[in-house]
Image (tube, rainbow, N blue to C red):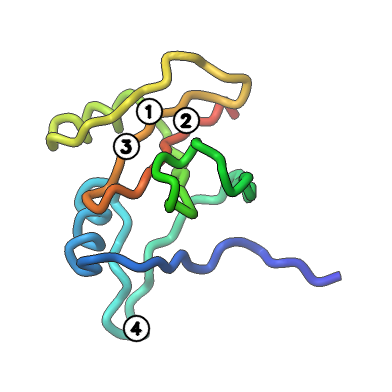
Amino acid sequence: MQKVTGIGGFFFRAEDPQALAEWYEEHLGISQVPADYDALPWRQEAGPTVFAPFKKNSEYFGRDEQMWMLNFRVQDLAAMVAQLERAGIKVDVDQEEYPNGKFARLYDPEGNPIELWESKS
């Protein structure tokens, strides 16, 4: 059986796509889509990826109409949180440490939830 080898892109609607792309680049280091085929897009480091459908009425994502949530792996959650807070971005750090690591949550300028995860492995 053939299997996919990873996520090749994440596409979503936005009120202001350019401003949102700039925010993700400035605050999370995700390069914008290249203007031509000679430039490379953002490359993620190899690591675990969880692909998990949730029940439609889950409150985990926040707003009822929210259909997705990004979870990004980070090397040092405390350093990332400090960086975001210095930029004036509110971050809620989960004080519990789980068997798989530590988590924090923030929202992009359009209210989309983002989870940060520092893996134990």
Residue 89's quadrant in the figure? Answer: top left
Give percent across and percent down for residue 95: 42, 14
Q: Earlier in the sequence, mark 3 or mark 4?
A: 4
Q: Is residue 66 above or below residue 121?
A: below
Front residue of 106 and 2: 106
Residue type highlighted by circle 2: Glu
Distance between mark 3 and mark 2 Cα atoms:
14 Å
Residue lying furthest top: 96
How many residues crowd around disc 4 within 10 Å: few (fewer than 14), some, or many (20 or more)? few
Q: Secondary structure at mark 1?
A: helix
Q: Secondary structure at mark 4?
A: loop
- Contact between marks 2 and 1 (CB within 8 A): the answer is yes
* Of labels 4 and 1, the one closer to you: 1
* Identity of the residue drawn at 22% across and 31% down: 90
How many residues crowd around disc 3 within 10 Å: few (fewer than 14), some, or many (20 or more)? some
- Contact between marks 4 and 1 (CB within 8 A): the answer is no
Which numbered disc covers residue 118?
2
Residue lying furthest bottom: 37
Which numbered disc covers residue 38?
4
The residue carrying mark 3 is: 106
Q: Earlier in the sequence, mark 3 or mark 2?
A: 3
* Of labels 3 and 2, the one closer to you: 3
Residue type highlighted by circle 1: Leu
Distance between mark 3 and mark 4 Cα atoms:
33 Å
* Identity of the residue drawn at 80% across and 71% down: 2
Residue type highlighted by circle 4: Asp
Q: Earlier in the sequence, mark 1 or mark 3?
A: 1
Which numbered disc covers residue 77?
1
